[in-house]
Amino acid sequence: MNIENMEAFVYVIHYGSFNKAADALFLSQPSVTARIQSLERELNCQLFDRVGKQVQITEEGKRFLPYAQQLLQIYRKGKQHVQYKKQLPNEMRIGCTVSVANYLIPGLLPALRERFPEIRFKLQTGTTDELAAKVLNKEIDLALARPVNHPELRAARLLLDPIRLHVYEGHPFLLEDNLGIEALAGEPLVFFECGALDWLRIHRIFESLDRPPRIEIQTDNSETAKKLVLQQAGICFLPGICARQEVEEGRLFPIDFAETSGISMQTCALTLQGENTDFVQELTAMIKARTSA
């Protein structure tokens, strides 16, 4: 069975059309169609229903999909092991979001240098979309960013960081027991927005309240948001890693609400499928040891 035919099948499903799959594979649309038809002949079944320009996966296609994905993954892992070089690269190019650069990298990089003394580390920051594109274009080796769904990328979870309300010392909420989220209605709120879906979940909780909170300041920079809370300009929902030091020092205090329980910011290592897996495993173990300490 031709691995390129299965790759075309998976890409058509991911992108929702033959044309988009062809663009992603740097092929012509007729070439993708020919690969799908070849796979259908091998399987002796129809994988897609074609209605005009629309394609819909058939029941046979749905049943075959997980096997195609697994075979592709096995092939890529096998290719990696065949081409594996024991010599580590001289330089590791790491992209990261601003939050990761501010709160995770400074404590992590010395440990990485100790573990891999022969590697030079080159860091750059950007948004998740920008970093994912750079990984795909091989401009960087890996990115520490939000999860991304792309057939050529592997997203290995490194950190799941709870998002909690943080208030400053002396705030009235610290005197309350069994505080309900409705109490936010009368409070000036600083809102840190990083564009991830979890922040949208918090917005939806606000919209469900009879009296939504007053968002007086909105920023896309967590450090700015944190400093505004420290200056008592308002209170703010922040990822735990952002405020960890200030909480330990007794300058910020997390408040839990049942409605926001389980809302977290996820940081992943984005790499090309089958590449830098050993390095990512080491990275995962280091971050787990640091955050559980």
Image (cartoon, grey):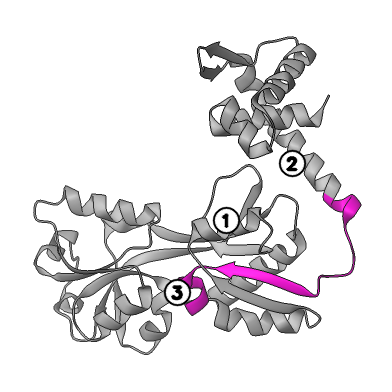
Crowd class of label 3 (few under 14; some 14 to 19; many from 20; radius 10 Å): many
* Residue at horizontal 54 percent and vertical 50 percent from the top: 148
Q: Residue 185 lies in what quarter of the image?
A: bottom left
Crowd class of label 2 (few under 14; some 14 to 19; many from 20; radius 10 Å): some
Foreground: 240 or 150?
Answer: 150
Q: Residue 248 lies in what quarter of the image?
A: bottom left
Q: Position of residue 152 (x, y in %)?
A: 66, 45
Which residue is labeled 1 in the image?
A: 132
Q: Is residue 36 left or right of residue 2?
A: left
**Residue 82 is one of the magenta-drawn residues:** yes
Task: Note whether 213 is above or below 225 in the view shown.
Answer: above
Which residue is labeled 2 in the image?
A: 73
Q: Which mark is residue 111?
A: none
- The CA distance from mark 1 to mark 3 is 23 Å
Marks 1/3 in contact by CB < 8 Å: the verdict is: no
Does dot 1 land on a helix, a strand or a loop? helix
Residue type (three-letter) at the residue carrying disc 2 = Gln
